[in-house]
Amino acid sequence: MTDLPSPGRRRWLKCAGAVWLLSVSKIGLSATPLVAIRIWPSSTYSRLTLESNSPLKYRQFALSKPERVVVDIENMHLNALLKGVGNLVRSDDPYIKSARVGQFSANTVRLVLELKQNVTPKVFTLAPVAGFKNRLVLDLYPASNISHHHEDDPLLALLDEYNKGDLAQHTPASTPLPGRAGKDRPMIIMLDPGHGGEDSGAVGKHKTREKDVVLKIARRLKSLIDKQPNMRALMTRNEDVFIPLQVRVAKARRQRADLFISIHADAFTNRAARGSSVFALSTKGATSAAARFLARTQNESDLIGGVSMSGDRYLDHTLLDMVQRLTISDGLKLGKDVLRHMGKINHLHKKTIDQAGFAVLKAPDIPSILVETAFISHPGEERKLRTAHFQQQVAEAILAGIKTWIASSAVHQRIK
């Protein structure tokens, strides 16, 4: 196996999980442009990705009895990499039962996925970005039970709306809350572990993946919050799955969250960079070059994780234009309180809050912050991020910041 090439300035993204990589040899390169095959299973949807040195042409259709999804890939010859695709299917994959390939014609390879249930497949291609080359992506969504799934978690319904381009239509300009937090209902805090699935986020020297660390921290924080009186934590994702940035925001609004906290562990080309940071939204440009750079790289998540459409621009424009000063002000105050408590457990990269146009912070009616817990690219901080002790400390510091903000902001009188 060989690693994927470095994406360059900021990230050291590597395709982890179920992956076979093509050995670099004259025989392999002449046989096929394919460099990797990956399968990412999750309860929400399963994804299969073919990565190639050049764009792949394909034809997709379905067969029944048994239920199968078939993809014919043109200008390709069968080789060991393709033959190994069946070994990538996990027994706990909710959608894929098995995978096999064959040389359908002289220049066409046929990929067949046998299914465990009826699915709605979405197939699309992605241009090279970061450390990835050309990708052919096959997402398998459940064909039914979307409305039933919505009863507990609207994520699947939101993804369905997003893929159809209907997210704006089903997301109102404002989402008034039923009653006041703390009096009529618990305060709802949406936790957003960054990245996931195809998007590993930053990767440290010792292969620590940002997406894994922040998910563990978010789970610890959720456990702490749920033990508090009149508080309840929800999560944009609670497994290793890619969720578009706009869907994360829409989920917070759909579930009427009072706060939105996105959790990350950043990287930089200079491994000496270290410390914790907290960021808030700006609608008037970034407050520093570093904040502008970070926002740009974080907003690339959709390109790295891959979305099937150019995107529903509703949250990027219409809603952003409606962001109230009070919401941003509350986010800044919350960020300052969280940053102060983070400073008790870790060095601060910067002692003040920065602002920039982070796409994941653009809910117009929810105070939102992005917490960079530590630099995963710093060897010492990478070691800390891997420990349960530091993960718990981070969770406790964020909760302490939330409590400080609640006590000082008269939030109960503001949220309606």
Image (cartoon, rainbow, N blue to C red):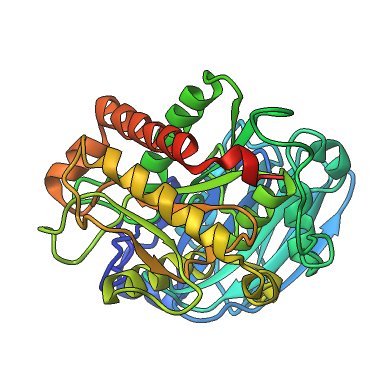
Q: Is residue 175 above or below residue 340?
A: below
Residue 105 seen in this snapshot: no
Residue 57: x, y in percent? Answer: 64, 79
Residue at 76% from the left image edge and 59% from the top image edge: 174
Q: Is residue 122 above or below residue 207?
A: below
Residue 392: x, y in percent? Answer: 33, 27
Left or right? Give the position of 282 relative to 202. right
Residue 140 seen in this snapshot: yes
Q: Quadrant of the C terminus?
A: top right
Q: Is residue 96 above or below residue 360?
A: above
Residue at 53% from the left image edge and 66% from the top image edge: 359
**293 or 92: nearer the eye?**
293
Residue 87: x, y in percent? Answer: 52, 42
Left or right? Give the position of 103 relative to 169. left
> Residue 151 is drawn in which quadrant?
top right
**24 or 350: nearer the eye?**
350
Left or right? Give the position of 87 relative to 8. right
Residue at 51% from the left image edge and 74% from the top image edge: 283
Total number of numbered labels?
0
> Residue 271 is drawn in which quadrant?
bottom left
Left or right? Give the position of 126 relative to 219. right
Residue at 20% from the left image edge and 45% from the top image edge: 206
